[in-house]
Amino acid sequence: MNALLEIDGLNKRFAGLVAVNDVSFTLASGEIAGILGPNGAGKTTLFNLLTGFLPRDSGRVRFAGEDLAGHSPHQIVNRGLARTFQLCRPFAGMSVLENVMVGCLAPRARRHEAPLARARAILEAVGLAHRAPAPVEVLPYGDLRRLEIARALATKPRLLLLDEPFAGLGTSEIEPISALIRRLHAAEGLTILLIEHRLREFMQLVSRVIAMDFGRVIASGTPAEIVRHPRVIEAYLGRDEAADPAAEPDEAPHGAA
């Protein structure tokens, strides 16, 4: 396996709370995988550790063979690892096009294409070309989700981390975002790791699931294997309900990840 991301014994503690506990797994180049877990499982904390927004207490993260210890978020982005966030926070007072152009100014992206041309191409790819001159304040929530992905793509990532890309979306808004993620993976060979609470859509997107609970990896496998895994069912439903295989959750409860 050509490992793009290698995580070995990663740990993060906040006072008495162990948020990420001895997490280890690898992600192959070109893979689309997902992190699954109930509220408080440590999923977003893991993303923050991988992208330099939080310092790790111990453990190692290697991306494309390079140890990311001590790297700042912008340095990690410029090595090809970008992310989206649960909350859409575009640059206020700027147009949709200008928001994407900011990402295109990253040294990694600027080496390959002119920022304006790249920004327009990305907006076309995510279905926001017609919104290019609009101020971000007028965008509906579904378009803000597309913009969040576009801004990450602007940095020319090799690995894209998606933190709840369907959060806050209605049923009719989810399929276009799902189709966009599939297209980015299939057409561009982009490696993707995502967190999502909408389990049905999540399981249809990923080829492998890494399940977490209380900061630990409790299972890893295909979606079909994971939805029947006793420890995963117990993590969502509790010990009593886990004995009933028909009681598979359709959606994880929302809240802190």
Image: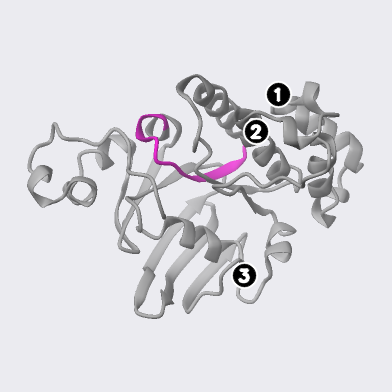
Return the residue nearer the eye: 107 or 28: 107
Return the residue nearer the eye: 8 or 100: 100
Q: Amino acid at mark 3?
A: Leu
Residue holding disc 1: 127
- Relative to 24, say whether 237 is above or below: above
C-alpha separation, residue under disc 1 versus residue under disc 3 = 33 Å
Mark 1 secondary-structure assignment = loop
Q: Earlier in the sequence, mark 2 or mark 3?
A: 3
Taking the magenta stretch, the answer to whether it contains residue 195 is yes
Residue holding disc 3: 68
Mark 2 secondary-structure assignment = helix
Q: Are circles 2 and 1 on residues that touch, CB within 8 Å?
A: yes
Q: Earlier in the sequence, mark 2 or mark 1?
A: 1
C-alpha separation, residue under disc 2 versus residue under disc 1 = 8 Å
Q: Earlier in the sequence, mark 1 or mark 3?
A: 3
Left or right, 256 with respect to 115, comes to left
Q: Which residues are magenta?
A: 188-201
Mark 1 Cα shell of 10 Å, populated few (<14), some (14-19), many (≥20) = some
Left or right, 246 with respect to 45, comes to left
- Relative to 109, say whether 149 is above or below: above
Q: For the point 76% across and 33% down, which residue is it?
A: 122
Examine the image and state in which quarter residue 213 appears.
bottom left
Left or right, 237 with respect to 20, comes to left
Q: Amino acid at mark 1?
A: Gly
Q: Residue 210's spot in the image, x, y percent?
A: 37, 50
